[in-house]
Amino acid sequence: MNNTSWPIYWLEYSSNAYLYGSEIEYLAKNNVHFKNNLMPPGTVIKEWYSMTNYQASRTEPSLPIIDGESHYHIKIDVETPDGKGCLVRLVFLDRYEREAGDFTIRGKEADFSCPLKTYSYKMQLINGGMTEFTYHSITIEEIE
């Protein structure tokens, strides 16, 4: 039983990230320190996409292609000094880029599957009341 896993790193410094008043220290692809004392809870800090328009955004897709017939496990490796967590939200989109469903993870790991009509999806790192954190990676693994 060999499961396929995809680590997702914070590769771009400022692309699709909340920059207003933020201090982002990019140490390595698996070690990004983020600090913002004035950011309200519920703010989307960073987004990753499974499909992008390269001509418009100059970014490549950073999420693996997943389908509605498989089951997946997600692991979140984010350190917060004050113990307050972050939320990770997966937003599934149909072929017309309308929301087909979503899934929010409040802990460190969870199992999920996406709706059958999913054409693409995005992943959002959301502020759950923290002011700083160190992002290492988020791993999506297919469960067989």
Image (cartoon, rainbow, N blue to C red):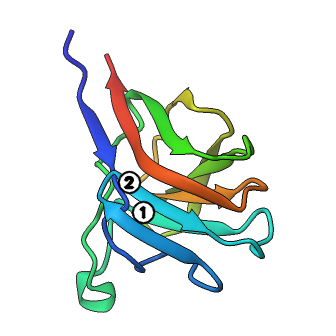
Q: Which residue bears the numbered disc 1?
A: 48
Q: Position of residue 126 (x, y in %)?
A: 65, 58
Vertical arrangement, residue 90 with respect to residue 40, above or below: above
Cα distance between the residues tagged 1 and 2: 17 Å
Q: Residue at x 29, y 57 (%)?
A: 29
Decide: few, some or many residues near mark 1? Use Cα within 10 Å; few <14, some 14-19, many ≥20.
many
What label sits on residue 34 in the rendered view? Answer: none
Residue 142 or residue 30, whichever sits in front? 30
Q: Nearer the viewer, residue 32 or 74?
A: 32
Which amino acid does the dot numbered 1 rest on? Trp
* Tag 2: amino acid: Asn
Which quadrant is home to the N terminus?
A: top left
Q: Residue at x 52, y 66 (%)?
A: 46
Of pointers 1 and 2, the one earlier in the residue sequence: 2
- Note whether residue 120 is visible: no
The image quadrant of residue 42 is bottom right
The residue at 37%/76% (across/down) is 13
Q: Which mark is residue 31?
A: 2
